[in-house]
Image (cartoon, rainbow, N blue to C red):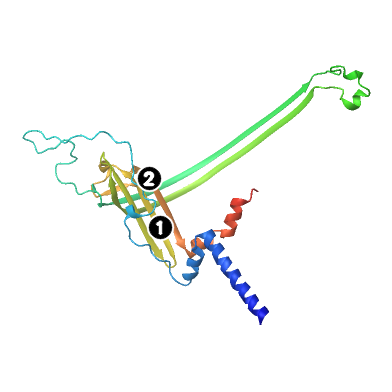
Amino acid sequence: MSSFSSASRLRRIAISALLLASCALGGCSSIDRLSQIGEQPKLSAIDNPTTQPGYKPVQMPMPKPEVASYNPNSLWRNGSRAFFKDQRAHQVGDLLTVTVNFTDKANIANETQRSRTAKEDSGITDFIGSQTITQPLKILPGRLLTTDSTSSADGKGSVQRQEALQTNVAAVVTQVLPNGNLVVEGKQEIRVNYEIRELVVAGIVRPEDIQSDNTIDSSKIAQARIAYGGRGQIMDVQQPRYGQQVMDVLLPF
């Protein structure tokens, strides 16, 4: 009984060590995945983007603020964008639609070749009385200052990439910069069976670039951050195991 209890205790210790190791390497994601076996991945809660971990207010070079002035006997205010009220997004909390139209195609090929051959032959056979030494040829060669060197390098590289993404996502204004530009951020999650597709858009837009229907093209977003991916069973299969990722980082070859 003692040997059986010892083996059972060792087995429990080994399982606990494996769970701790997987938690340390994968941020406890293995335990979370085990608890979600047979269940659909959960959607993220709708949260305030400014309260998310790592959020930082955007700071950009700004011009000096101008004091609004009114002309006598005129309803027009200097700096106003329209005479009537503008229904487009212009303050924190407003929504606008971002039209993501991303098409990227690159075909690059580079090749660099380099070679060099050098030879130095001094022709000196007697250097500082070397011939006076007993058996000089065994100690010093016939030519004392002779060098040969050859080096060559051939490097080739090519890039072939073609990407296309067309979709729409609603974004919320999280910050208004002193010059009137808007910081926007939008996130969209779509669950299909056991896979969640995520689309994140963030950046800085000019109010003038927002169309009359309250939409803006992604190509007009400055400092744009667009992420499109997913999580679920398919993404889990496509990712290498934690051990393989650790070995890829640590192994020098």
Instruction: Give the amino acid type for the residue marked by disc 2 in the picture.
Output: Ala
Q: Is residue 14 above or below residue 242?
A: below
Q: Residue at x 53, y 40 (%)?
A: 108
Q: Residue at x 46, y 49 (%)?
A: 163
Q: Is residue 238 visible?
A: no
Q: Residues within 10 Å of mark 1 (few under 14, many from 20)?
A: some
Between 228 and 148, the residue placed more toward the observer is 148
Q: Residue at x 40, y 64 (%)?
A: 191
Residue 58, quarter of the rendered image: top left
Relative side of 139 to 177, left or right: right
Q: Position of residue 117 (x, y in %)?
A: 72, 27
Which mark is first along the chain, 1 or 2? 1
Report the number of numbered marks.
2
Relative side of 236 to 168, left or right: right
Residue 52, quarter of the rendered image: bottom left
Residue pointed to by mark 2: 224
Q: Position of residue 182 (x, y in %)?
A: 28, 45
Residue pointed to by mark 1: 198
